[in-house]
Image (cartoon, coloured by chain):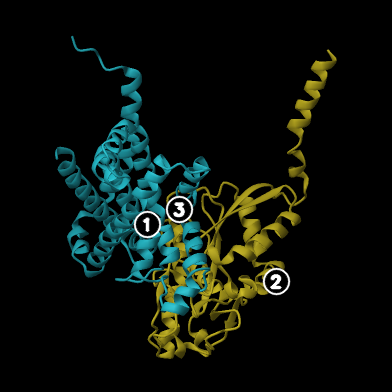
Chain colours: A cyan, B yellow
Amino acid sequence: MRSRLPVVLVLPAVVGLAFLLVPLAGLLVKTPWETLPAQLFSEEVGQALRLSLVCASLATVVCLVLGVPLAWLLARGDLPGRGLLRALVTVPLVLPPVVGGVALLLVLGRRGVAGQYLDQWFGISLPFTTAGVVLAEAFVAMPFLVISVEGALRAADPRYEEAAATLGASRWLTFRRVTLPSVMPGVVAGTVLCWARALGEFGATITFAGNFPGRTTTMPLAVYLALESDPDAAIVLSVVLLFVSVAVLAGLRDRWISA
Amino acid sequence: MKGVLAVAALLLAGCGSPAPATTNGTGVTGQVTVFAAASLTESFRKLGAEFEAANPGVEVTFNFAGSSALAQQINQGAPADVFASAAPANMKQVTDTGAVTAAPATFAKNTLQIAVPKGNPRKVTGLADFAGADLKIALCAEQVPCGAAAKKVFEAAKVTPAPDTLEQDVKAVLTKVSLGEVDAALVYRTDVKAAGDKVEGVDFAEASSAVNDYPVAPLAKAPNAVAAKAFVDYVLSEKGRKVLFEAGFAAP
């Protein structure tokens, strides 16, 4: 006999689902569908959407390259003050993104602590560039990746790694052939979170990278500015961003989960 | 018994404390919520404090944001008493829906000024400098009032600017100037004044071609209509004018 689903779990679950989905439904109800195609194929929207996808993906790559090793260090490294480090890594999550953007300006801006040398020595100025968008997004999104990968690493059984070590594998080989495959679901989940967060990033981006069409105007910035003059256009833009992100995430999920 | 009396006395005292509010002579009491354009932040805070001092028992709360965002909040039914907008267009958004039925009064005028980092390192002297690609330049996006005003002055000066960023509001532009991330920007004269000594202003002749009127009006559904009217009157009074003038606004 199949046991009944416990009401104490199902009821809050349904309420939770409604809480997440009803605002989306509200957005869809208010969407002026007749203007959607025209908006979708306008040059501005295409440009912003392309820029958003490219920047979020590049930011995710940056996060993977730096974040996975950082998660490994936090989970496996024998560091003094590891608890404190772990807490510090989550700072960008707590920080209002606009403050994150100002912090980035103070460090990497043209007059920033490090940025002034980039400017003087190499002639590189990061604010108001597409690279600046990628940096701002990576700054805000990386904790999502680090936390999920670190969680997976800590839950993984270290005996497999020990076994690999006793068989003579180096730590690098063990990491690549034993550790990483065993925490793959955590890495995938973290990557998805990280990409989604980067795609929706607004505050740090507009503060650090500014807003210029084709260079730094990503979809969330375009939505915000459209809201100033034409709320209907803003809704259409939000719906476009929503559909594209859901499509990308659903597509990737099927591929990864079934593989 | 003594204990009960003490508690009763405390309760009475507690109930009695808001009472003096009704006896300040002006009849203006309670909360008054003012939605005001972001560029009014400093001057209205000061005005609000003076208004509270003149009317004991009144408490003014402000919501400062971009005028268009405020107009939307009001049209969505936000519980406000007074709306002070940085542009007549945003005031029209609320009179169109009937959220404001009284005739808005213009209480101040603002013009643009060139903002440069302290010391003006790139020697910016006028609008013509904004056409150069070698300077880092910040402007407001055209969708917000300061961007629309900037467009007008550039048209009057026949200059095509080469901005590096189009910011979402005037304060964001100022942040970039005060951090030295841009060499020049166009903001309101009052913003340059409010930014302190990290930012310097440079006057230019074409500023007169984009004069921004600031309208104020009480809302039709103001929860505190008496105080709303009193606040609007105070803004328009001689004392209000003085505060606004000190902040860099011109008289209407």
- Frontmost of labels 3 and 1 is 1
Residue nearest the viewer, comparing A18 with A221: A221
Q: Residues within 10 Å of mark 1 (few under 14, many from 20)?
A: many
Q: Label 1 belongs to which residue?
A: A138
Q: Is residue A97 left or right of residue A252?
A: right
Residue A259, visible in the rendered structure: yes
Q: Label 3 belongs to which residue?
A: B73
* Tally of numbered discs: 3
* Quadrant location of the C terminus of chain A in the rendered image: top left
Q: Residues within 10 Å of mark 3 (few under 14, many from 20)?
A: some
Q: Which mark is residue B242?
A: 2
Image coords of residue B193 (percent x, y) = 62, 74
- Separation of disc 2 and disc 3 at Cα? 30 Å
Residue nearest the viewer, comparing A4 with A232: A4
Q: Secondary structure at mark 1?
A: helix
Q: Secondary structure at mark 2?
A: helix
Image coords of residue A127 (percent x, y) = 42, 70
Q: Amino acid at mark 2?
A: Lys
Q: Check the image and report above or below for B64 versus A160.
A: below
Q: Amino acid at mark 3?
A: Gln
Q: Residue at x 32, y 31 (%)?
A: A159
Q: Residues within 10 Å of mark 2 (few under 14, many from 20)?
A: some
Q: Secondary structure at mark 3?
A: helix
**Disc 2: which chain?**
B
Image coords of residue A125 (percent x, y) = 42, 74
Q: Amino acid at mark 1?
A: Ala
- Separation of disc 3 and disc 1 at Cα? 33 Å
